[in-house]
Amino acid sequence: MKRWMLLPLAVLMFLPANLAAQEDAAPTWWAVFNEQVAPANVAAFEANSAAMHEVILANAPEGMVYYTLSGPESGYSYAIPMESMADFMKMNEQWMGMVNQIGWEKWEEMQASDLVEHSSMNFYVEMPDASYHPEGYMESLPDKPVRHYDWLYPKPGMETEVNEMLKEWVAMYAEHGIDSGWTAYQAVTGEDLPLVVLITPAETASAYYMMSEEVDEMLGEAGQELMMKSMSMLRKFEHNEQMYRPDLSLVPDEM
């Protein structure tokens, strides 16, 4: 997280013009930064991140927010919620002001770039019609710190079909009254597009898979048929989990 701050504004050039100009409060945007750390360096990276987090807490301006998650496969992710791309510009200004307050020399001394094997940054935008939010659904729950990710890579030219397929899943879940939900996001930037990500909160990774098996039984043959149809539209499918890290996040107390 410390290595990606103060990104050049030129990153906006990678966005489609109609998305980069969007100022509507909906749907929700996220800027997500990721850092991959070798297993041998995790302990040192954790210690460095904890120390830097204390410095950030002491100097962060009001309103600056990011959620930190980590997982053995996906590394460390830092997710910043945005209502529009204008918030991305605001985020850069916040970081610059904070680092000026800390002091650039001290900030550079706290970096641990040698512990990071790979870093990336991408934008994601929520897909409300492809998300399933049953009554009472809340994405951020203290008793559900795990996030299960399903990474769907549509075949070229089948983005619309995949979106319609997700709506079928929403309808099927609703018909059966399933109380576990997910939020769908479209990746706007990245190295392997098109990409849609489904995020499901869970108490633990094992709890997610137990729930998934129960849902499969409830949906029965109709669910199996829709799954086969779904997979035929994808060139690749991946999944993994991350754990929410409040100890490395910056969020208001009420969140």
Image: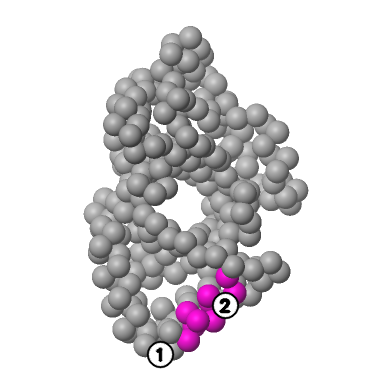
Q: Quadrant of the N terminus?
A: top left
Which residue appears farthest toward the front when viewing the image? Answer: 40
Q: Check contact, mark 1 vs mark 2: CB within 8 A.
A: no
Q: Quadrant of the C terminus?
A: top left
Q: Quadrant of residue 179?
A: bottom left
| Location of residue 233 in the rendering, given as x and y in whole percent from the top left corner | 59, 74
* Residue for badge 1: 221
Query: Vertically, is 220 above or below 69?
Result: below
Question: Mark 1 or mark 2: which comes first in sequence?
Answer: 1
Q: Quadrant of residue 132?
A: bottom left
> What amino acid is found at the position of numbered circle 1 in the picture?
Glu
Regarding residue 88, the answer to whether it shows in the image is yes
* Residue for badge 2: 232
Which residue occupies 52% across, 19% down? 97
Which residue occupies 42% across, 28% down? 115
Query: Vertically, is 12 above or below 148?
Result: above
The secondary structure that most of the magenta stretch takes on is helix
Secondary structure category for the residue under label 2:
helix
Q: Nearer the viewer, residue 150 or 235?
A: 235
> What amino acid is found at the position of numbered circle 2 in the picture?
Ser
Q: How is the image coloured?
A: one colour
- Give the crowd class for mark 1: few <14, some 14-19, many >=20 residues within 10 Å: few
In the image, which residues are magenta? 225-234
Distance from the alpha carbon under mark 1 to that under mark 2: 17 Å
Query: Vertically, is 91 above or below 104?
Result: below
Which residue occupies 48% across, 20% down? 98
| Location of residue 25 in the rendering, given as x and y in whole percent from the top left corner | 58, 50
| Location of residue 68 in the rendering, given as x and y in whole percent from the top left corner | 38, 40
- Give the crowd class for mark 2: few <14, some 14-19, many >=20 residues within 10 Å: few
Secondary structure category for the residue under label 1:
helix
